[in-house]
Image: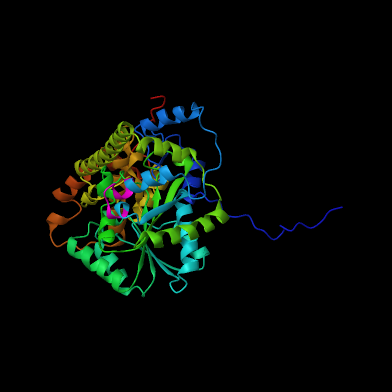
Amino acid sequence: MSTLSVFMDVPLAQKLEGSLLKTYKKDDCPNKMFLAYKVCMTKKGQPWVSSVVHKIRLQIAEDPSLNYEYIPVMGMKSFIQASLELLFGKHSQVIVENRGGGVHTVGDSGAFQLGAQFLKTWRRDSQVVYIISSQKEPHGLIFQDMGFTVYEYSFWDSTQLCLDPNMLLSVAEQAPRGCVFVIGNIGNCKLTPSQWAKFMATMKSKQIFPFFDIPYQGLSTGDLEEDTRFLEYFVSQGFEFFCSQSLSKNFGIYDEGVGILVVVALNNELLLCVLSQLMNFARALWLNPPTTGARIITSILCNPALQGEWKQSLKEVAENIMMIKEKVKEKLRLLGTPGSWDHITHQNGTHSYLGLSSQQVEYLVKKKHIYVPKNGRINFTCINAYNIDYITQSINEAVLFTMDSENLQKPRLYTSPKEGPSSPLARERLCARGLAAELGAARGDRGSGALLRCPGRRTGD
């Protein structure tokens, strides 16, 4: 006898993976490229894992003393203490005065889930959240689902091709009293001392609560202390705040999803009260956090030799990222690509903006099988010696193609025969694009994707 299902009215949800990745997977071009992976990639196109992590994984697997019991709701004390010292430094006011603590969470999304739950319950008069970062962040959905009114801002200026610190100051001045500021990648904004002073004074006068996002400490500049130096500004000014500290990317243990919700309070008594409430929420969310990632990280951070090896691996990755960006900029310069490309090297971290228009991005995706997000923010570790020439040549082609399209749409008024389409200057520009482009235009297939062949991908390296 058939019965009606209680799930009959439940529709099929849209897949969580982005439409760009779905399109990439469906593309049958054998040499397609995806430049939007979230993880840090190696020169061979594989997810990067710190070399020291492999050693510790083996040691943990062969350790007979581990009993794999449930750990406390807060997490391993040694893991939390080591993570706090990594974030603030051993001699920070927060550590010395014992007014900083944390709860082990399931990744950074778990930290935002836990923090949002606390703020929803204990700061009922501040239900407005401003999310300010260099890109659209996924944790906006977490706050929306909790019932917060969410406003999102990006301090990337697509017109000036730079991260604009003035936007941060402007949002703070317009924000209502008592709201929550979720701030990511603030270190990349390069605020001057006077801008920092103005920003913190505005936040303090309006009682704005800071909630920082630290997704990959050490991978931005290669210097762990430099990447989180701005936190000391807030500590020294007596701010209380939350901080989502993700430790998956900078150790290369992406599948472990290791995070901490860090709390900084005015004193230890207040800190203990906040942590006790957070543990109550954690019991309802996941009860006991997973241990493998925490054990790996604790083993490395608590051993000076291993920590030194890990720091060196981070520095090498950061230096490689900057070298890739320098090479991309230089190759675009040598190709004569119109415009300035200095903004590429002015940005830190694995992910940075190319500064391309939507039409140029569309050209790369549809004509060249190079998959780039609509905002042009790519993972530069996806670029290596095997694909950099094709990528830069394709960017150059996309820029020239869109310039030609604009010129076709807007008839040009020449003021001199020297400027006409048959002038020496025009012929020189045409030659600069290469014989292949000239022949393609003669065939009428300019922009068809035939100007440059996809290079073969090296395998088995």
Residue ranking furthest to the top: 460
Residue range in magenta is 86-94
Position of residue 401 relative to residue 204, above or below, is: above
Where is the C terminus found, in terms of image quarters?
top left
Position of residue 162 relative to residue 173, above or below, is: above
Is any part of residue 107 visible from this angle? yes
In the image, is 316 to the left or to the right of 268?
left
Residue at 31% across, 64% down: 239
Residue at 32% across, 35% down: 307
Nearest the viewer among 100 and 140 is 100
Residue ranking furthest to the front: 269
Q: Magenta stretch: residue 28 in it? A: no
Spot occupied by residue 339 in the image (x, y as percentages of width and height) = 21, 52
Spot occupied by residue 137 in the image (x, y as percentages of width and height) = 41, 57
Nearest the viewer among 332 and 61 is 61
In the image, is 15 to the left or to the right of 451?
right
